[in-house]
Image (cartoon, rainbow, N blue to C red):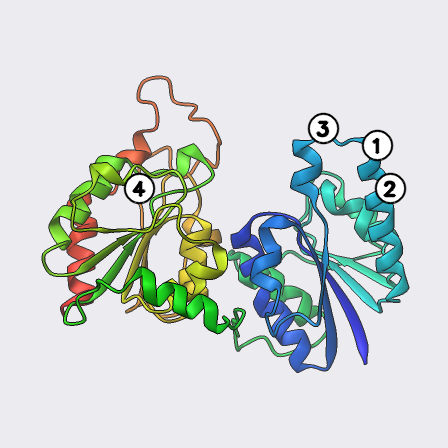
Amino acid sequence: MKKVLLIKLSALGDVIFTIPLANNLKANGWEVHWLTTEKGFDILDGNPCADKVHFLPMYTWRKNKLKLKYLFQMIKVLFDLRKEKFDIAFDCQRRIKSLPFMRFCGAKRRILSHFSTEGAKYGANEILPTSPDSNHMVLWNLDYATYLGYDTSEIKMSLPNQPEEIKQKINDLTKDLDKTKPTVILAPETTWEPKHWNIENWIKVAEKLKDRCNIILTGVKLDASVFPKDCINLVGKTNLKDLIELFSRADLVIAPDSGSAHIAWASAKPALIEIFCCTWTEYFGCFGNDEKYFTMTGNLPCQPCGARTCQKSEIKNACANVPKAEDVIEKALSILFK
């Protein structure tokens, strides 16, 4: 069997956006291996899109100041990759941090998208001849399969199957749900501060929907005490695999541009309202069913900027105030009560 390595070392959403490429390659007879970090491992472990997952603890290395012992760990990872004798490696990261693994993984063909930055091209021996025609990250990744001559008209997503203990855990956490009402999950947190929609907006959404819906709050550091008392507070009580199961039981998920939003979209079960502040809807937004998946933004002159720190001097983080909470509430009600 032909063997391919997909290198994706960044955020959870970016890994999810690469899964359709892996499924396309598997459908065309490839044994698919991944190289990923802490942020991607749980979404790939047990996922049918991966025959084998090679783990790179990159965030642990950074946190611990790249100690010398981590250099030996990295060398071991490279030796393990070379033993696989890959036919092809695709650099889906397209940045300098993937360069050493791309360059020394031992693949006969090391293919990189024309859309790459930071000198990533020096890890490849083959460059796609043109940039992808479409903007979304899923389609950028599928451009690799197109380059090999495969049909990419079908976008197949997959997530790990959850064991019974996780299903039972979610049963216990949601035992107080009113089965006669739709379930809405609010997942306000992101890793970038400029991606955050103001907490006052989230509270307004919860207040307006709580009488007609079950409201579940998820996150790690979210202050659930400022939300209505009858919301089900799961903040700090779930891990990534728990969220996969939880989102698959929801009717609607509302989230900013975040890993939570991308998991909800990948699960294909709930409707999704994804709120964009500083990032690009055309690159990272949910898509596929215009009656189920919605991206909302404020359309300010400065949006999107893509900056991790707001550059506007007159109104800092103005994009965090838009869209208005009333607009998101109206969209949610139109989805849930057609």
Residue 93 percent location from the top left of the image: 67, 50
Q: Nearer the viewer, residue 196 or 182?
A: 182
Disc 3 element: loop
> Disc 1 vs disc 2: Cβ atoms closer than 8 Å?
yes
- The N terminus lies in quadrant: bottom right
- The C terminus lies in quadrant: bottom left
Q: Residue 261: give its label.
A: none
Q: Earlier in the sequence, mark 2 or mark 4?
A: 2
> Disc 4 vs disc 3: Cβ atoms closer than 8 Å?
no
Instruction: Indicate left or right for 7 with 87 as reference.
Output: left
Mark 1 crowdedness (10 Å alpha carbons): few <14, some 14-19, many ≥20: few
Disc 1 element: helix
Tell me the distance, in whole angstroms, between the alpha carbons under discs 3 and 2.
Answer: 14 Å
Residue 193 percent location from the top left of the image: 42, 33
Tell me the distance, in whole angstroms, between the alpha carbons under discs 1 and 4.
Answer: 47 Å
> Residue at position x 62%, y 68% from top?
21
Residue, disc 3 = 65
> Residue at position x 43%, y 23% from top?
311
- Would you place residue 135 above or below residue 20 in this image? above
Residue, disc 4 = 299
Q: Amino acid at mark 4?
A: Asn
**Could one spot residue 324 in this view of the protein?**
no
Is label 2 or label 4 in front?
Answer: 2
Residue, disc 1 = 68
Q: Amino acid at mark 2?
A: Phe
Q: Residue 72: give its label.
A: 2
Q: Nearer the viewer, residue 325 or 319?
A: 325
> Residue at position x 21%, y 64% from top?
177
Residue 197 percent location from the top left of the image: 31, 39
